[in-house]
Amino acid sequence: MTNYNFIFGCVLLFNTLVTFWASSYRKKHFPCGSSSSEGDKQDEDPSPLIGGGDKEADSADVEHGGSKPDKSSSAASDAAANIRHSQLLRKYLAVYLLAAFSDWLQGPYVYALYAAYGYSQHQIAVLFVAGFGSSMVFGSFIGGMADQGGRRKFVILFAITYALSCMTKHFKSFGILMIGRLLGGVATSLLFSVFEAWLIGAHAKAGVMSHLGKSFSTAQYGNSIIAILAGQIANKAAAFKEFEPTSEGSGFYTGGYLGPFDISLLSLIVCGVLAFSLWEENYGEKSDGDDGDDSSKSGKSSATSALKGAFSTTMRSPDILSCGIISSLFEGSMYIFVFMWTPALTALAKEEMGEGEEFEGLPFGVIFSTFMVCCMAGSSIFSIAMDFMKPEQLA
């Protein structure tokens, strides 16, 4: 049998090397070739997204509630802004990384769990499509609803919705599992919209908009680490206890592939509690016509008009349209991979078995972690290649 842990270790080592090579630390302390001159440019003219103190960054903070520093107070102002940003980032990461962790935990074992219940590939495909369709439908307007109703409330709603989705996984019932997939689609839409919207609003309120790029970069890096760890933890949880019904003839199961979903459930509970206790509520920007008795009507009309405006803008701009088509094709191929990798590897593993050997399953969590390490390595390779090629050539 293939040694998946060895493969994971090799890929992790490769990722460590390319990530170090692409890092700003390496470019600053170990410059070589064209990267040296580019690193010097970055030191001389730092980007405002990194959180520097240039004029554009200062004006961004002033515009969103900060105070314009003079020459004598600029150092104190920068220090105060850094403190506000650090406090804000810690609050955000405590909630966001738990939410991402709960999502990544489920990834390796969704198909495997449905297969363990005895459903055919066609039935599992129906469940997957229901989840993707739910995310597509609700994702079209869930962000606007969060802007109107409060982003922190919708983060808590995300935790509740996704927790209910995890609970449905214990039932060997196609209908209940379908409800779980629909709830999971709603939760996914919330995960990829409301969290970032809250972060932007919180930065604007705190007057630290110049630090927003650094916050997104830190969150993305943390998300990559969490994804790798989640696969390893999910693998241990799936092997902790045997997959079986609570009683003979019962449709309620425990153990086995349900272990990762149970850990995800606990993570979501903590995520919701932390969002309620640590985060302050913020809302989307309102126009002058949103006040008074017509606020609910204007909220509904603004969501509709936003969709219409986005559609017309897309159709008028060839660049936006082509970018959308390319993204859709890439996402479509990725979702096909998400659905097919589990049965494909299972079939290959069974073919490699010798006569008389019993198939004991695959370490889907370790395999998933390997995929996530490869994604992280790909991001670092892209950063390195950007020093020598244009993005269009890489695409």
Image: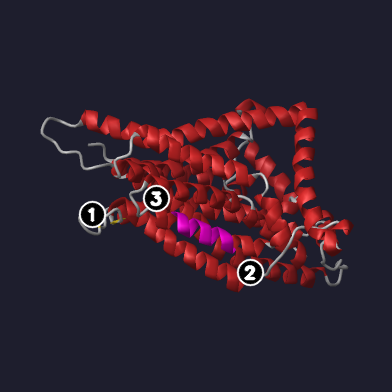
Q: Is residue 67 left or right of residue 88?
A: right
**What label does residue 242 carry, if any?**
1
Q: What distance separates the C-alpha of mark 3 from that of mark 2? A: 28 Å
Q: Is residue 52 visible?
A: no
Q: Tell me where residue 319 sits by quadrant.
A: top right
For marks 3 and 1, give the one nearer the viewer.
1
Q: Is residue 181 left or right of residue 53?
A: left
**What label does residue 26 carry, if any?**
none
In the rendered image, the vertical position of residue 335 relative to residue 134, given as above or below = above
Locate the C terminus by quadrant.
top right
- Crowd rating for badge 1 (residues with CA inside 10 Å; few <14, some 14–19, many 20+): few
Q: Nearer the viewer, residue 33 or 47?
A: 47
- Crowd rating for badge 3 (residues with CA inside 10 Å; few <14, some 14–19, many 20+): many
Residue 195: percent from the left, percent from the top?
62, 57
Q: Secondary structure at mark 2?
A: loop
Residue position marked by numbered label 2 in the rendering: 279
Number of numbered discs on residues: 3
- Crowd rating for badge 2 (residues with CA inside 10 Å; few <14, some 14–19, many 20+): some
Residue position marked by numbered label 3 in the rendering: 231
Q: Nearer the viewer, residue 30 or 384?
A: 384
Q: Secondary structure at mark 3?
A: helix
> Which mark is first along the chain, 1 or 2?
1
In magenta, the rendered stretch is 156-165
Q: Nearer the viewer, residue 107 or 366?
A: 107
Disc 3 + disc 2, Cβ < 8 Å: no
Q: What distance separates the C-alpha of mark 2 from that of mark 1? A: 39 Å
Name the amino acid, label 3: Gly
Residue 52: percent from the left, percent from the top?
74, 58
Characterize the magenta stretch by its predominant secondary structure: helix
Q: Residue at x 60, y 67 (%)?
A: 91
Name the amino acid, label 2: Trp
